């Protein structure tokens, strides 16, 4: 989860998110360079240090066409690399379904057992001391750590979106459609997210909590919860 | 050809702007009613405007123009200045001189920022209800402890700033 005044990304908990953070740093540096140049030129113009007598400047026109093209290539290449990386589905160990409803998520683990449950937000009045307001749920999505997980996302009524920022996942939940995404958690922990598509009055109150644990604890949990 | 046409267009635009912005006290100034006629312009990058500033010379000025046809060393400093003022409206120093407009702009910006601040203070005092109970100090410290126990954001975030051995924030 984020701090109260956090502006940047949360620390990555999946390899894709690590790539996204690096790319974001790169893109932001490019943007900073361009903005600094523009600010510099603007200041020069406001101080009236630039004249307008020029009518013909073939060489500089060539440079300021080629250079932006190179900058765009430098942005596009890593972007496309990550895009294709995200679409690689490498033998997931577990497939689970997330179904968005108004206003809760339900999850189905149907690979080995017939396991399904609803996940409602814990109201602020019932929150135990020190827990996170508007983020905690009664049943978390428990998954084994360091294993590729395939998520099938859909919705029961209106549009929702299943998002967990630290895993670099955000997938729309569309009624009548199955969207697929996958991730691998690099460490154990509890990862929070919130519904990311407006879906009515309680859109802000249907969070997502993913709990990534070692395999034995996951197996423990799945046998306990299905009973 | 294109360049000189562009310049005269620019000159006419600048003249109409300079008429609006700068007061001029010389008599006999070309009134720019007809934008197809060559016009006078004060611009740092157009050093020699198409026409002289003063078109209708008084008798005294005409005499001075006659004197100008002779050797220039015979002219006094005042006469040279008068000849300049016939040809040009402003000196380069006058052209480059800034206005005090920035003070007005800055003052306006700060004033409206202050106004907005007052509005926000009024809102907080009269409009908004109390914050949720999860903002109390007790809850915040329990929450922070839970975040550290969970190792939230351990790479560069909050858990990386806590020294787990010494049980204190890293210096």
Image (spheres, helix red, strand yellow):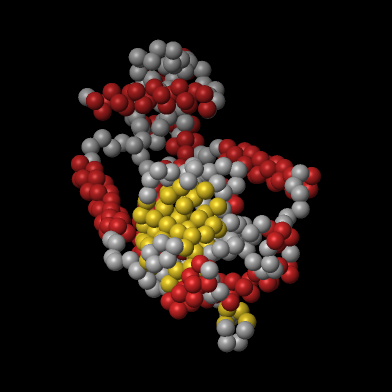
Residue B157 visible in the displayed image: no
- Which quadrant is the N terminus of chain B positioned in? top left
Quarter of image, res B140: bottom right
- Which quadrant is the C terminus of chain B positioned in? bottom right
Quarter of image, res A24: bottom left
* Picture coordinates of residue A44, whole percent (x, y): 42, 46
Q: Residue at x 54, y 75 (%)?
A: B151
Q: Residue at x 76, y 44 (%)?
A: B127
In the picture provided, is A70 more to the left or to the right than B153? left
Question: Toward the viewer: B120 or A216?
Answer: A216
Residue B147, compared with residue A72, is above or below; it is below
* Picture coordinates of residue A154, whole percent (x, y): 43, 49
Residue A117 visible in the displayed image: yes
Residue B14, compared with residue A182, is above or below; it is above
Question: Toward the viewer: B5 or A32?
Answer: A32
Question: Toward the viewer: A103 or B108?
Answer: A103
């Amino acid at each position: 989860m984020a701090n109260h005044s956090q502006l940047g990304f949360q620390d990555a908990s999946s390899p894709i998110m690590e790539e996204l953070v690096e790319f974001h740093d790169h893109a932001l540096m490019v943007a900073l360079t361009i903005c600094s140049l523009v600010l510099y030129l603007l200041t020069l113009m406001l101080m009236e240090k630039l004249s307008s007598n020029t009518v013909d400047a073939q060489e500089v026109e060539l440079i300021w066409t080629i250079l932006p093209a190179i900058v765009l290539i430098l942005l596009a290449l890593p972007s496309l690399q990550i895009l294709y990386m995200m679409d690689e589905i490498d033998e997931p160990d577990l497939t689970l379904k997330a179904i968005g409803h108004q206003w809760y998520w339900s999850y189905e683990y149907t690979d080995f057992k017939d396991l399904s449950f609803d996940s409602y937000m814990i109201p602020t009045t019932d929150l135990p001391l020190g827990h996170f307001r508007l983020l905690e749920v009664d049943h978390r999505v428990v998954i084994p750590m360091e294993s590729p997980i395939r998520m099938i996302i859909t919705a029961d009524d209106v549009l929702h979106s299943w998002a967990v920022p630290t895993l670099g996942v955000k997938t729309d939940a569309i009624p009548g459609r199955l969207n697929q995404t996958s991730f691998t958690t690099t460490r154990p922990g509890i990862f929070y997210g919130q519904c990311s598509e407006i879906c009515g009055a309680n859109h802000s109150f249907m969070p997502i909590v993913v709990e990534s644990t070692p395999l034995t604890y996951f197996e423990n949990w799945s046998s306990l919860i299905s009973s | 050809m294109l360049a000189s046409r562009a310049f005269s267009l620019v000159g006419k635009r600048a003249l109409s702007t300079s008429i609006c912005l700068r007061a001029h006290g010389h008599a006999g100034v070309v009134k720019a009613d007809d934008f197809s006629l060559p016009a006078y312009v004060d611009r740092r990058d157009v050093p020699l405007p198409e026409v002289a500033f003063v078109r209708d010379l008084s008798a005294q000025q005409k005499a001075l123009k006659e004197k100008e046809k002779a050797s220039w060393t015979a002219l006094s400093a005042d006469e040279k200045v008068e000849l300049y003022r016939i040809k040009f409206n402003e000196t380069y120093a006058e052209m480059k001189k800034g206005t005090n407009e920035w003070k007005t702009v800055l003052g306006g910006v700060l004033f409206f920022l202050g106004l907005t601040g007052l509005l926000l203070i009024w809102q907080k005092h009269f409009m908004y209800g109390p914050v949720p109970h999860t903002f109390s100090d007790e809850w915040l410290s329990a929450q922070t402890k839970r975040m550290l126990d969970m190792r939230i954001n351990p790479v560069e975030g909050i858990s990386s700033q806590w020294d787990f051995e010494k049980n204190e924030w890293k210096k």
